[in-house]
Amino acid sequence: MNSISIYRNIFVSVLLGTLFVVAMMMAESQVAVLSLIVLAAVSCIVLQKKGVIRKLGSDFASAEKFANGTIMIGALATAVVFAGDHFILLMLTTVLIYVVACLGLNIQFGYAGMVNFAGAAFFGAGGYAAAVLTMQTGLPHLVVLVIGGLVAVIVGFLLILPVLRTRGHYAAVVTIAFSLLFRTLVEVSPVLGGAQGSPVTGMVIFGWNFNEGYQIAGFDVSFYINYFLFALILTAVTFTIVRRVERSWIGLNMDSIRIDETASACFGMNVARWKVTAFTIGNFFMGIIGAFYAMMLGFIAPNNFTFGDSLIMVSIILLGGIGSIWGIILATGIVIILPEKLQIIQEYRFLIFSLGVILVLLYRPNGLLSRAARTYFPGLLRGAR
Amino acid sequence: MDILTRSQSAKIRSSGTPQIVLKARNVVRRFGGVVALNNLDLDVVEGQILGLIGPNGSGKTTFFNVLTGIYAADEGAISFLEKEITNLPAPQVFRSGIARTFQRARVCLSLSVFDNIVLGDHPRLQQGLVFNLFRRSSFRREYEECVERVRELLEMFAPHLVAKMFEPVETFPMIDRRRIEVCRALFSSPRLLLLDEPSAGMTHEETRLLVDEIVALRTKRHKLSIIIVEHEMDLISRITDRCVVLNFGSKICEGTYDEIASDRNVQEAYLGVEA
Ligand SMILES: Nc1ncnc2c1ncn2[C@@H]1O[C@H](COP(=O)(O)OP(=O)(O)OP(=O)(O)O)[C@@H](O)[C@H]1O
Ligand SMILES: [Mg+2]
């Protein structure tokens, strides 16, 4: 194997991907956006047919650290290009926020097989924790983020017994009911601002005020760059932890209870323990990122975490590939950016996503980028053989 | 009825009394109106292979399920290695040293051979969050030990799978899936192994190979006892020390294969003739 060619392939594909994202962001007219979409779809299909995607997949897997680093640089470069543009930075940051939330959901749904249609409620729980804590206490905002995660975990504990006692569709119904209930409770709660919502302070960390922009050599840099950079850090941390979950006995246990609870129990596994673990880790990520989201918007209201948002999170996982981290990142990009750029589909976005999910389930049941077989220590394997 | 074979009795005379590892008494399990197990008494002697046979629906799988804690017994008591295990939850039964295979091979198809086998010793792996997520070099040491142990087991039962240890099980034929399932059940070095129709879905020849390997293993692990459920009688006659015959949930006969094969009740049960 020629390792230079591996690095070159990774570099070229990340470069092309970054250029595509930049072009997509810059495209103003609907015709330009549509042509870019068609271009991407056609090239993916052609490359897939020619086996290039498969080859690239194995290249990325064999030089994982380099690939991740290159993608990170691509993301930073994109932010630099749009450093002056509030709207685009906000959109890119929203993508990262959904990535973190969906990676949390992925631990529950993708690994442990627990369908959770209340994702947005846990996200909202973190958001409201941020609202109350930033408005009424002087707690450092990093602590607020962590408490946001913990609040989501505690709210999740209310749900854990019914979720453990029911299976499959019934568990799904329990989470749907909870999602609606939580929203209604918030709407009638005067402390949380009712249907009008509640203001949230912008983020400040060690004197670094996120709501202030910069002037660099006469060029105005949007304050959203702060949120983008911090979201990128949160994404990287979440990514690393979720990867380690997958590549450990914990991920193995979760896969095992998803596939066959009874057989797992027959080999000594405490099924409930791993369901609670998956539920807790997942909700923690959703809560943290919900708190961050609220601080970025400066405001949180029941409309920020509707049942529709929970559905979007589940469909991102189905589209991207159940359990597939990169698949989820790709799908989040598509699901968040597409309706923003293609105004014509705004109103029909749910219809289009449902169609997309159905098509994917029919023709690519493992999602756009299916999950690869587990390797606990990538690279080790190849060296050993 | 004498529950020892001649060779076994000879062995025991030199080493003291035979140890009965599993003792089931008056076990009853009903499903609605169906009595799937009716006052079943069953003993397993250490180091022996017990054949559990009977027509379809006679309660063999149900016995395994009650024993391993998947179903609760309605009445009766089961003890294993002098310890009461009646109606313990499945994980605790496993921890007491009983491992099993399933009638329909129940391996995790999308997981690798390694993953499936490692799951067979779940309680002995370190399961802490900090250990798994943040002490990666310690985790790696445990992981590498497991790779080594899985390799050893595969070399015994499926040497051709050693090089394919990290490939998903779904890519292998039935015989290999069965072998992987047996390896998973043996990975924790259990004291009692339950095999539910290992021949299902395999040819005669494949079954013979697999079972011979299991029997060979017993010469290395003297303390391993086995209960095997099987419809192929030549296999039962060849490998078992003793057999228990079930019909409609009741034990109708017990003894060596030759004894039960010549029993009138057994013949009638298999031919479906009313006694
Ligand atoms: N979960 C269940 N619910 C209802 N009835 C059951 C259940 N499991 C087993 N039975 C019934 O209990 C009886 C014994 O079934 P069991 O599966 O133990 O038979 P078996 O001896 O293993 O048969 P086979 O040789 O076909 O595998 C049957 O009448 C079966 O229908
Ligand atoms: Mg059966």
Image (tube, coloured by chain):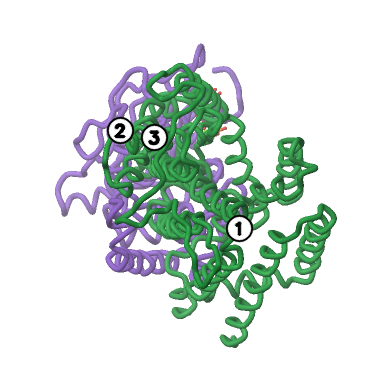
Q: Amino acid at mark 2?
A: Gln
Specify the label residue A131 is tagged with.
Answer: 3
Q: Amino acid at mark 3?
A: Ala
Q: Amino acid at mark 1?
A: Asp
**N-terminal of the two: label 3 or label 1?**
1
Under circle 1, the secondary element is: loop
Colour-to-chain, green? A
Chain of residue at mark 1: A
User: Where does the N terminus of chain B fall, quadrant-wise?
Assistant: top left
Q: Which residue is mark 1?
A: A85
Colour chain B appears in: purple
Residue B207 in percent (x, y) is at: 55, 54
Task: Determine the residue positioned at 34% across, 35% down.
Answer: A135
Residue A330 in percent (x, y) is at: 62, 56
Is there one chain holding both mark 3 and mark 2?
yes
Q: Which residue is mark 2?
A: A136
Q: Is residue A137 above or below residue A145?
A: above
Q: Is residue A222 above or below residue B73?
A: below
Quarter of the image for residue B114 reads bottom left
